[in-house]
Amino acid sequence: MKNKIKKVPVFKNEDAERDFWATHDATDYFDESMRVELDLSQLKPTAKPITIRLPNTLMYDLKMIANKKDVPYQSLMKIMLSEAVKREYAPISPLR
């Protein structure tokens, strides 16, 4: 006898959804035997590839830091760039 598939509730926010799936089995809510066709041909990349020339010594240092942190150097560079941009856009505190 096949178990009835439960209906997935509507969540107020992502935190509620995350908490729900942390305590519930997805196989109770989805029939894994059902095939779903997806058309991803119109999907656009969310990142833009760029080319940047950096001094060899800077690349070496970045790779050493990335190795120490156990992350790919490209990921480290994205993190560093993101943090620098946030600092530039951060509102200046009137108490400074």
Image (cartoon, rainbow, N blue to C red):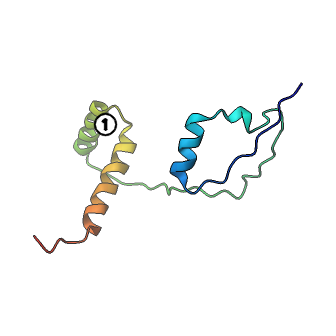
Q: As rendered, which of 66 and 3 lies closer to the eye?
A: 3
Q: As rendered, which of 86 and 3 lies closer to the eye?
A: 3
Element type at mark 1: helix
Residue visible at 23% across and 39% down? 61
Q: Position of residue 34 (x, y in %)?
A: 84, 37
Q: Position of residue 79 (x, y in %)?
A: 34, 49
Q: In this rendering, would 32 be left or right of 76?
A: right
Q: Position of residue 41 (x, y in %)?
A: 73, 54
In the picture of the structure, the residue carrying the numbered disc 1 is: 66
Residue visible at 37% across and 54% down? 52
Residue visible at 68% across and 35% down? 26
Most extreme residue toward the bottom is 94
**Tally of numbered tags:** 1
The three-letter code of the residue at mark 1 reads Ala
Q: In this rendering, would 89 be left or right of 1?
A: left
Label 1 packing within 10 angstroms: few (<14), some (14-19), many (20+): some
Quadrant of the image containing the C terminus: bottom left
Q: Quadrant of residue 35?
A: top right
Most extreme residue toward the top is 1
Q: Quadrant of residue 84?
A: bottom left
Q: In this rendering, would 19 be left or right of 28?
A: left
Q: As rendered, which of 54 and 67 lies closer to the eye?
A: 67
